[in-house]
Image (cartoon, coloured by chain):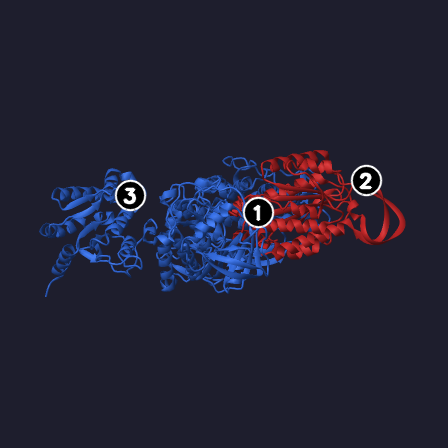
């Protein structure tokens, strides 16, 4: 995006920002069929650490997640305050390396790019989770720096980490990511939501990222419920003022988490 | 015919004769012509056997100014003569006191502020004595006149006149409608309010534990009983219009009234007692949705209260978000935001005068229909007597209460919240303590780090964006009052010194008058904008229109007739290689007349990265072929060179060894990598953090040694630059405009030079480099 517009968006909006980074697993296993009608092709392939039956038709876990992310955006855009307060960046991990799909910008400005890019996400490759979390934290740091330079108030950022497997990127990157999120969360400079998808998500590893809040496992493929809950939490936060204590709607967790 | 002096003397005589008591204020005693005045009045006082009354607080203030030039400078930096005037005033008072023409009046209650002493004394004596009051302060004059007005509760006040000392040393009468001089903080006039409307002060928090039994919470369609002062009325809840953490609000069958019904766990004895107290006073202010009656369910249990219905958008979701402000109130201009401040202030003042503290002032409990129609909701949380308001937003919490549990709030605490609210209306949505590089709002509030400037006092940390312009267009008095309240060393910063609603009301009403009368708009057409696009117009400056956008700007801020915003902007196009969006700025186009770059930076730099390192067939030296060069030769269908550039330029010699170049004259220092011709480039590259062997430097050195040095006069030119360059670089490094100059040199000279070298336009490059040196020579006046 043009730097001038980016700067103008940042400066002319006085609303305190809620920066949110969605760090999403798009490894091969997210291409797993989780619903819909399928026809077995009889082929088998090895991906992301295991053998898969290749089928046609059906709905993949990734498609469910894409639906959830788009719903998240739509809900935020419908809310008068959250629309100008929330800023979202999306980092995915699949293939061999993480990818910055959408960088921070105000939601209106991001809209056309979002519509293209989120729906075009594809599942393939490994699970370089540590690398992705590091990239996400870097994006959050950069955005915070931009807020400070412009004199824009902000809430401490949120990081949503969703995976259906276990990390298989570099171990040192993973350790670095874990120590960074721990330090930030312990100093109240980050709220992290580690979410496991399905039975094979490595909940022990997710727990290492979050010193204060245990990871939660998504109930079935309830991405919609989760993202609805998330957008409602963002809306509530955006109506408070920086410095206010943010209370999360813990009752609402029941709608989407296996407790 | 009487002359002017006779008329003035007669007026003075009448004043002294006709009024029982004569009071004089500090500022009149500090007037330049105070001596003349005392000369004029002394014979009259002697004849009438009267004395001027001076409160002790005034004497103390004068003594302080007389003894401490430091205090004078600190509190009144604009009045350089204050110390002197105070010394004279003290001498005069002592002399008159010896002659029994001055009485010092020590107030038993020992009020600290002179202004308050006057109002307090006038309040006490207004039914007994007529008063002549001499002051230069229009704000105080107005307040005093209000004390001496008959009201519904007080009849039979005596005559009162306020005068100021004129230039001729005689008295001039203040009249009601005169322009108000700058006001000072005064205590709210709660003494004026009848007791049935006024709550008492409390020193202790009321603590009552426990819930009240409730067997049924009324719902839509249910009948409930409204109770006030023993009278009851059956009303029906029609439909729920809203709900929150405490309960729900229902429309009732009484038009214009709604009922708040609490959730069962919120029906506490404390709440019940608080509402009883609230209902014991007659609070009736339009737009303040104060409890009007208790609501009981059909079993006669307390479940809620009745109030007037509110409407409108809350400030947080309208005025405080510029996009929504535009959406909901598209017609508004600054008159409307100032009017909104006045409307809100009047309501808060009404409450403060009755000792009601709002406590949790925030943008979500003030609803706006129009600048003059505003509703205050959630009034059951207000602090009355010992019933506190247990919540608050950190943003509106004064430094002394930050990070603490809310207890009894003082008016001083609350005035901070009021000031914050006003600031955020005038800078729609921007909190006063947001600043560049700030540590966060709470820390900034605690430290009093306020970033907006007042005259020469500035931090340079004002948030970027339109906020500085919003600030600039305020009246000086408003800026001063915000500054002194928010800045940690400001004279209004301490809890007890913060301006109250009465003070702000006067400032905003005056501002409204200036805007409405067209006076401000006549001086500056941007005065009426909520978001001005530039600073307030200064009468000492010339303004001209930008050649592109046509908006007026201070002449000095324009560059060759173009405004900054237009210069940064420009034609958008795509990089011919990668398609990334680029801007051909108006600065490049109209000021520098430079060419439009075809490539974006990355693609351009890619051209300069080395594709292959080769050995020259002729001289045996190493040379490089960059991606750019490769592309250039490929495009022309040529083979890639096998000889270095220098050898290519030379006529082919049969010998494989190179002909030695003529040695430079002995006076010429040997060209070292950092010296001479490339000195300026070296400085630029160092500034940009590029290594000494970066592409730019290597290319230019190569150009210097292998082409320029071989040209006629080339050696001389290199030598000339060798002498000049260090001087230029020294000036450059010390220059205030360093950043912009380095950028300019890079964009306008070095990069185009490189491009010219790459394309073999050596002569053009030489010209451009000469132009750069010439420009810098001129800039820094180097011969």
- What is the number of the mark on residue B742? none
Q: Position of residue A174 (x, y in %)?
A: 70, 36
Q: Which residue is mark 2?
A: A49
Q: Say which quarter of the image contains residue A179.
A: top right
Q: Residue at x 69, y 54 (%)?
A: A70
Q: Chain of mark 3?
A: B
Q: Position of residue B582 (x, y in %)?
A: 60, 54
Query: Is residue B320 visible in the rendered structure shown here?
Result: no
Give the left or right position of residue B461, taking residue A76 as reference.
left
Instruction: Choose mark 1 or mark 2, whichever is in front.
Output: 1
Q: Which residue is mark 3?
A: B111
* Closest to the observer, B41 or B68: B41
**Which hue belongs to chain A?**
red
Q: Residue at x 35, y 52 (%)?
A: B195
Q: Which chain is blue?
A: B
The quarter of the picture where the C terminus of chain A appears is top right
Q: Which residue is mark 1?
A: B265
Residue that extends furthest to the right in the rendered view of this protein? A42
Q: Residue at x 79, y 45 (%)?
A: A29
Vertical placement of residue B8 versus B731, above or below: below
């Amino acid at each position: 995006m043009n730097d001038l517009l980016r700067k103008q968006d940042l400066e002319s909006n006085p609303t305190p920002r809620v920066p949110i980074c969605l760090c999403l697993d798009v490894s091969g296993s997210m291409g797993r069929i989780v619903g819909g009608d399928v026809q077995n092709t009889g082929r088998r392939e090895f991906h992301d650490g295991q053998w898969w039956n290749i089928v046609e038709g059906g709905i993949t876990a990734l498609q469910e997640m894409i639906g959830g992310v788009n719903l998240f955006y739509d809900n935020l855009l419908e809310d008068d305050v959250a629309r100008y307060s929330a800023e979202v960046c999306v980092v995915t991990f699949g293939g061999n390396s993480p990818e910055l799909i959408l960088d921070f910008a105000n939601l209106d400005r991001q809209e056309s790019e979002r519509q293209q890019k989120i729906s075009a996400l594809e599942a393939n490759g490994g699970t370089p989770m540590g690398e992705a979390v590091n990239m996400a934290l870097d994006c959050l740091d950069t955005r915070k720096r931009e807020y400070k330079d412009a004199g824009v108030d902000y809430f401490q950022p949120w990081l949503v980490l969703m995976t259906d497997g276990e990390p298989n990127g570099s171990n040192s990157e993973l350790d670095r990511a874990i120590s960074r999120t721990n330090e930030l969360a312990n100093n109240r400079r980050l709220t992290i939501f580690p979410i496991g998808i399905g039975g094979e998500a490595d909940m022990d590893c997710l727990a290492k990222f979050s010193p204060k809040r245990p990871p939660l496992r998504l109930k079935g493929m309830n991405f919609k419920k989760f993202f609805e809950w998330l957008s409602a939490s963002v809306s509530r936060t955006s109506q408070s003022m920086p410095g206010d204590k943010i209370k999360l709607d813990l009752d609402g967790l029941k709608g989407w988490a296996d407790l | 015919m009487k002359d002017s002096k006779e008329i003035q003397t007669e007026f003075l005589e009448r004043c002294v004769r006709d009024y029982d008591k004569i009071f004089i204020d500090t500022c009149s005693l500090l007037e330049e012509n105070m001596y003349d005045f005392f000369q004029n009045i002394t014979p009259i006082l002697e004849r009438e056997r009267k004395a001027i009354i001076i409160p002790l607080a005034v004497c103390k203030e004068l003594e302080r100014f007389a003894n401490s030039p430091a205090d004078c400078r600190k509190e009144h930096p604009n009045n350089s003569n204050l110390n002197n005037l105070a010394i004279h005033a003290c001498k005069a008072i002592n002399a008159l006191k010896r002659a029994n023409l001055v009485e010092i009046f020590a107030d038993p209650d020992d009020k600290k502020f002179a202004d308050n002493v006057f109002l307090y004394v006038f309040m006490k004596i207004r039914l007994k004595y007529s008063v002549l009051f001499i002051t230069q302060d229009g704000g105080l004059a107005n307040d005093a006149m209000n004390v001496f007005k008959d009201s519904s509760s007080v009849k039979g006040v005596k005559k009162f006149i306020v005068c100021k000392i004129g230039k001729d040393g005689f008295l001039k009468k203040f009249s009601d409608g005169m322009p108000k001089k700058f006001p000072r903080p005064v205590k709210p006039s709660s003494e004026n309010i009848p007791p049935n409307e006024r709550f008492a002060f409390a020193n202790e928090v009321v603590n009552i534990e426990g819930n009240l039994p409730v067997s049924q919470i009324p719902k839509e369609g249910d009948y409930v009983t409204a109770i006030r002062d023993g009278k009851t009325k059956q009303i029906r809840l029609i439909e729920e219009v809203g709900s929150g953490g405490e309960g729900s609000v229902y429309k009732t069958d009484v038009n214009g009234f709604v009922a708040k019904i609490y959730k069962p766990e919120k029906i506490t004895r404390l709440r019940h007692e608080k509402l009883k107290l609230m209902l014991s006073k007659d609070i009736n202010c339009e737009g303040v949705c104060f409890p009007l009656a208790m609501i009981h369910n059909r079993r006669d249990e307390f479940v809620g209260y009745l109030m007037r219905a509110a409407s409108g958008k809350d400030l947080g979701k309208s005025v405080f978000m510029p996009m929504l402000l535009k959406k909901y109130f598209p017609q508004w201009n600054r008159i409307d935001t100032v009017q909104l401040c006045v409307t809100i202030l009047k309501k808060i003042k009404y409450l403060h005068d009755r000792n009601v503290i709002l406590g949790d002032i925030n943008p979500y409990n003030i609803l706006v229909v129009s600048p003059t129609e505003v509703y205050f909701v959630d009034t059951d949380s207000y602090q009355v007597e010992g019933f506190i308001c247990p919540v608050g937003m950190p943003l509106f919490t004064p430094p002394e209460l930050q990070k603490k549990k809310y207890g009894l709030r003082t008016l001083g605490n609350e005035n901070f919240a009021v000031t914050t609210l006003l600031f955020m209306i005038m800078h729609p949505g921007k909190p006063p303590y947001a600043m560049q590089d700030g540590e966060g709002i709470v820390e900034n509030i605690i430290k009093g780090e306020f970033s907006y400037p007042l005259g020469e006092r500035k931090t340079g940390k004002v948030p970027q964006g339109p906020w500085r312009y919003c600030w600039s267009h305020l009246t000086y008095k408003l800026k001063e009052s915000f500054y002194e309240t928010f800045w940690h060393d400001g004279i209004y910063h301490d809890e007890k010194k913060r301006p109250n609603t009465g003070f702000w009301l006067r400032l905003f009403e005056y501002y409204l008058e200036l805007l409405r009368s067209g006076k401000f708009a006549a001086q500056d057409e941007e005065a009426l904008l909520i978001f001005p696009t530039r600073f307030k117009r200064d009468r000492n400056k010339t303004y001209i229109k930008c050649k592109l956008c046509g908006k007026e700007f201070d002449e000095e801020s324009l560059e060759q007739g173009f405004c900054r915003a237009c210069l940064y902007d420009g034609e958008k196009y795509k990089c011919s290689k990668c398609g990334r969006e680029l801007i051909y700025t108006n600065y490049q186009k109209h000021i520098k007349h430079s060419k439009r770059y075809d490539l974006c930076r990355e693609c351009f730099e890619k051209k300069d990265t080395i594709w292959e390192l080769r050995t020259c067939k002729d001289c045996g030296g190493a040379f490089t072929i960059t991606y750019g060069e490769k592309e250039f030769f490929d495009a022309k269908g040529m083979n890639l060179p096998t000889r270095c550039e220098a050898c290519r330029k030379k006529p082919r010699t049969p010998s494989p060894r190179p002909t030695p170049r003529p040695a430079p004259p002995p006076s010429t220092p040997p060209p070292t990598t950092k010296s001479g011709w490339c000195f300026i480039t070296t400085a630029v590259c160092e500034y940009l953090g590029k290594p000494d062997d970066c592409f730019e430097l290597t290319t230019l050195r190569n150009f210097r040694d292998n082409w320029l040095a071989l040209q006629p006069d080339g050696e001389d030119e290199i030598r000339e630059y060798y002498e000049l360059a260090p001087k230029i670089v020294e000036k450059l490094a010390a220059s205030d405009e360093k950043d912009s100059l380095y950028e300019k040199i890079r964009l306008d000279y070095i990069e185009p030079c490189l491009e010219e070298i790459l394309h073999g336009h050596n002569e053009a490059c030489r010209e451009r480099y000469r132009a750069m040196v010439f420009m810098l020579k001129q800039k820094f006046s180097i011969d």
